[in-house]
Image (cartoon, rainbow, N blue to C red):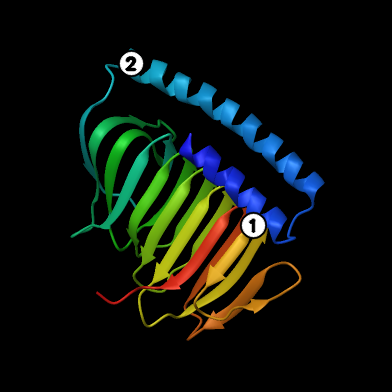
Amino acid sequence: MKETRDEKIRILRLLESGKVTAKEAEGLLRAISKEREKMGVMDRIVGVVSSGHGGMRQVSEEFEAERLFLDVKASDLTAKESPDERFRIYGEGRVVVGDEPDVVRMSLFGSMVIEIPRNSSLVVNLKGGNLTGVIGVPVELNSKMSNIELRVIKPIDIDVNLKIGNLSLSFDEPVAQRFEVINSMGGVTDDFGLKKTARGFEGIVGEERGFIRIDAKLSSIELIKTKEV
């Protein structure tokens, strides 16, 4: 898989730059192989479950909620702003709605778009998938072996727990965020001149109106200013 090759290349670059030892690199390569085996099993389970429920189909869901919990496995999700106060989820795939009281939870499979209302918040558990688009509400991201590329359109709180993946956050001006970034055995690139600390990087850009907290392992992290069109 391309993702596996990218992860191995990332480890070799860390070894070349002296950020990890040869023994650490060997252990990380073994860990990636084990994780990929688990992901292969999970993908097969998703395929069986999907086929057992009629397979992929055109999905269109619309509802109101203050907070939404999403489980996204081996799928692609594109985030957009909602034009009103309602969530909308549509695309090709399958949606499973949870039955927990007082909690709006959905599991998504396939290729979906989510429109997010401005007065809401979001929790996304992402495994072996891709999350792209724009975000303008508080969000908690728990990601494993996935790729995240989001444009942050206003100061908000973002809490990221990331393991073996890629995270790219671009920020619209004016930026008014506090940053706290930890990336164990990984790389961090930022356009804001964050201060390097014993644990990672931190700093305040502009006013402190939002808090970006990232706790990552063996990942590639980019924090950049949105390029002018």
Number of dots carrying numbers: 2
Q: Amino acid at mark 1?
A: Gly
Return the residue nearer the eye: 160 or 190: 190
Q: Nearer the viewer, mark 1 or mark 2?
A: 1
Q: Residue at x 50, y 65 (%)?
A: 222
Circle 1 SS class: loop
Mark 1 and mark 2 residues within 8 Å of each other at the beta carbon: no
Q: Earlier in the sequence, mark 1 or mark 2?
A: 2
Return the residue nearer the eye: 122 or 113: 113
Decide: few, some or many residues near mark 1? Use Cα within 10 Å; few <14, some 14-19, many ≥20: many
Q: Residue at x 75, y 40 (%)?
A: 27
Disc 1 and disc 2: Cα gap in Å? 38 Å
> Against 81, is 30 above or below?
above
For residue 172, the mark is: none
Circle 2 SS class: helix
Residue 208, horizontal then vertical, whole percent: 51, 81
Q: Residue at x 39, y 49 (%)?
A: 131
Residue 22, horizontal then vertical, whole percent: 79, 48
Q: Amino acid at mark 2?
A: Ser
Question: Can residue 200 be seen in this snapshot?
Answer: yes
Q: Quadrant of the C terminus?
A: bottom left
Q: Quadrant of residue 98?
A: top left
Q: Residue at x 41, y 56 (%)?
A: 149
Residue 188, horizontal then vertical, whole percent: 59, 65
Furthest residue in direction top, as rendered: 52
Return the residue nearer the eye: 227 or 43: 227
For residue 51, the mark is: 2
Residue 68 falls left or right of residue 92: right
Decide: few, some or many residues near mark 2? Use Cα within 10 Å; few <14, some 14-19, many ≥20: few
What residue would you read off at disc 1? 186
Residue 223, horizontal then vertical, whole percent: 49, 69
